[in-house]
Image (cartoon, rainbow, N blue to C red):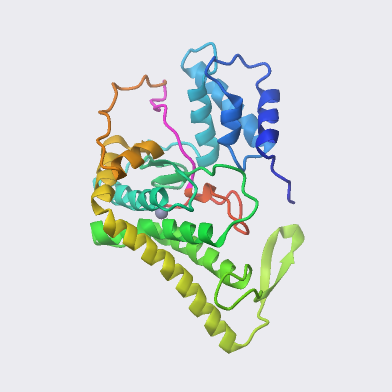
């Protein structure tokens, strides 16, 4: 069953309804919150409001502040933080460099959604998360945008290879998603040298909501050419990411080391590092709530919803 998702005005209206009986702090701007929650449905937004109110209550505050909404939003978008999950120092280092690779490529590529946050605090199934937030609601995707996505997905593995000199299974989900996108570009969206043709008719079992079979309506020779094109698209993303990481090697190392120290960086901080600026020293420890969770935030790699990719995919070790 497919239910349309509300656009930014729709989300603001839904948030207004759900916050009607909630005492809001002066700094709460529902239009900002609506812009920061693309892809969320009405029920998700109701959950964001509930979580924000719970968070305020845990802090013994009488009003719900913007920071409560940030915490709530990221919990809904990315799954709860799992601080209880203990990573070895080796895993942490690997995750920091992997996520730094995604973050650097995302921050540098002009056609990508802006980088929101990057963290090595485990969330849901993911050891680390790089989160981009679109500027607006997207209804279609350009070839440049999709190529940037593939490059960002490749950035994690490349950073592992170059700086840890080891490959882990952590990048498996990235590679699968990149390949899936590339195949759709070639076979469904006509974005390759094979031209504007669609290859492979799908038989969908509607009530199950998933593909059950794919008919091959092309020759063996075409199959080989499709594979070549898919490989070319993925390799293109790999080369783009590899080039960015080589050119800005210092920035990549600084981002990874800052992640090891701080566990979380926002998009502006990553840009500061890329521009060679020094980050402001860590502030005094933030007041922690009774569960010891800091006021920090994100959304899963799988959270960027792309056409044809299943929604609500569980974030994998990233
Ligand atoms: Zn990854």
Residue projecting furthest to the top: 62
**x, y (%) of residue 125?**
46, 47
Magenta stretch bounds: 290-300
Q: In this rendering, is residue 303 above or below 64?
A: below
Residue 168 in sight here: no
**x, y (%) of residue 111?**
49, 53
Residue 40 in sight here: yes
**x, y (%) of residue 76?**
55, 36
56 lies left or right of 21: left
Q: At 49% across and 79% down in the image, what residue appears? A: 228
Q: Quadrant of residue 213?
A: bottom right
Membership of 32 in magenta stretch: no
Q: In this rendering, is residue 72 above or below 305?
A: above
188 lies left or right of 92: right
Q: Quadrant of ligand 1?
A: bottom left
**x, y (%) of residue 102?**
39, 52
Q: At 32% across and 62% down in the image, what residue appears? A: 243
Q: At 40% across and 39% down in the image, what residue appears? A: 267
6 lies left or right of 151: right
Q: In this rendering, is residue 122 above or below 29?
A: below
Nearest the viewer among 29 and 160 is 29
Q: In this rendering, is residue 198 above or below 148?
A: below
Q: Quadrant of residue 117?
A: top left
């Amino acid at each position: 069953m497919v239910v349309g998702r509300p656009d930014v005005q729709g989300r603001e209206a839904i948030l207004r309804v759900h916050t009607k009986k909630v005492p809001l702090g002066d700094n709460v701007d529902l239009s900002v919150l609506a812009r920061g929650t693309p892809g969320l449905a009405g029920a998700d937004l109701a959950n964001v409001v509930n979580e924000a109110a719970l968070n305020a209550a845990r802090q013994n505050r009488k009003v719900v502040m913007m920071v409560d909404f940030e915490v709530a939003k990221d919990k809904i978008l990315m799954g709860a933080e799992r601080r209880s999950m203990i990573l070895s120092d080796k895993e942490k280092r690997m995750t920091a460099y992997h996520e730094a690779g995604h973050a650097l490529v995302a921050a540098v590529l002009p056609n990508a959604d802006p980088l929101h946050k990057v963290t090595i605090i485990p969330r849901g199934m993911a050891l680390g998360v790089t989160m981009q937030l679109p500027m607006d609601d997207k209804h279609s995707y350009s070839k440049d945008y999709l190529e940037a996505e593939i490059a960002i997905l490749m950035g994690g593995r490349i950073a592992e290879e170059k700086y840890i000199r080891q490959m882990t299974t952590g990048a498996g989900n990235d590679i699968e998603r990149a390949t899936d996108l590339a195949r759709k570009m070639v076979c469904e969206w006509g974005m390759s040298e094979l031209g504007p043709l669609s290859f492979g008719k799908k038989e969908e079992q509607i009530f199950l909501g998933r593909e059950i079979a794919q008919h091959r309506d092309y020759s063996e020779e075409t199959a080989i050419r499709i594979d070549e094109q898919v490989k070319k698209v993925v390799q293109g993303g790999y080369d783009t990411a590899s080039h960015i990481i080589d050119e800005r090697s210092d920035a990549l190392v600084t981002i990874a080391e800052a992640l090891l120290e701080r566990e979380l960086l926002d998009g502006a901080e990553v840009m500061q590092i890329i521009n060679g600026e020094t980050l402001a020293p860590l502030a005094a420890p933030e007041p922690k709530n009774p569960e010891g969770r800091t006021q920090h935030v994100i959304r899963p790699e799988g959270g960027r919803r792309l056409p044809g990719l299943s929604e609500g995919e569980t974030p994998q070790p990233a």
